[in-house]
Image: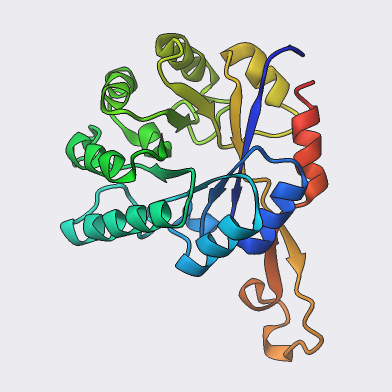
Amino acid sequence: MNNRKYVIEIASSDFATTKSAVEGGADRIELCANLAEGGTTPSYGTIKQCREAFDISLYPIIRPRGGDFLFTKDEFEIMLLDVKLCKQLGCHGIVIGLLNMDGTIDLIRTAQLIEAAYPLGVTFHRAFDRCKDPFKAIEQLIEIGCERILTSGQQPSVVDGIELVAELNKVADDRIIIMPGSGVRKENIKMLAEKTGCTEFHSSLRGKERSKMGFIHESFKDSVESYINNAINSEEVKILKNALL
């Protein structure tokens, strides 16, 4: 195990959580907004400031809204604009995922986004876990130039989808990276590495912290929205990495 090169990707939700993830030794950042909705495209200002502040591989998610992965023409145009923006800002890659109504990969528009992003790397996110035929999908994503698939093995938690992840990694045969995510924790990451053979792992390590506001309005004192902020503990990132040693 020790001589394998592992990559830890952390999903962050803003500048502060990105800073903590970087300080903890993350190898790559999936930069998002609204992680509670599964992640949506972060703002121009967030991407720019993170790109300038941190010397780390930065992959913003390109997703104009939460919900399903069936996008309208207008939404796709927004995605194209955001891809071009990430390219202009010097990001290392993007994270995308588009499906058709019948559960197949939206190959035409996925390929268009990959082409627009070039030479940036492209991760296909857990929209993959909602597709009808993962083995057909993996071949299609290899064909159009995706470099990695983020997957929990078509289960809500990767621990429950571990057998499919292992099978996908075997089929991938170094033609595309299979990156387990959703439920990757310090307690299970070594087991996931051993049972799947994967070397890249995705985790959000989502935490919360109390606001530093001095004045707390009585009517909103229990409001998560008002006085609880997203947080990542940098020590948790270090622990997650060290669990692979």
Residue sitting at x 44%, y 29%: 148
Quarter of the image where the C terminus is located: top right
Residue at image location 70% in from the left, 49% down from the top: 21
Q: Could you tell me residue 194's position as x and y percent?
A: 66, 13
Residue 42 as seen in the image, left or right of residue 24: left
Specify whether 50 is left or right of 69: right
Taking the spot 28% from the left edge, 46% from the top edge, the residue there is 116
From the viewer's perspective, tell me whether residue 60 is left or right of residue 146. right
Who is closer to the viewer here, 217 or 84?
84
Indicate the position of residue 73 as horizontal and vertical percent values. 16, 57
Relative to 137, is 88 on the left or the right?
Answer: right
Which residue is rendered at x = 41% and y = 28% of the image?
Answer: 147
What colour scheme has been applied to the protein in the rendered image? Answer: rainbow
Q: Is residue 193 above or below residue 104?
A: above
Question: Residue 13: in sight, yes or no?
Answer: no
User: How far across and how far down the image is residue 146, in percent?
Assistant: 36, 30
> To which quarter of the image does residue 237 belong?
top right
Total numbered labels: 0
Q: Answer whether residue 217 is visible to the viewer in this image.
A: yes
* In this view, 94 is above or below 180: below
* Front residue (pair 155, 110): 110
Tell me the quadrant of the picture where the N terminus can be found: top right
Counting from the top left corner in percent of width and height, residue 127 is at 37, 39
Is 37 above or below relative to 170?
below
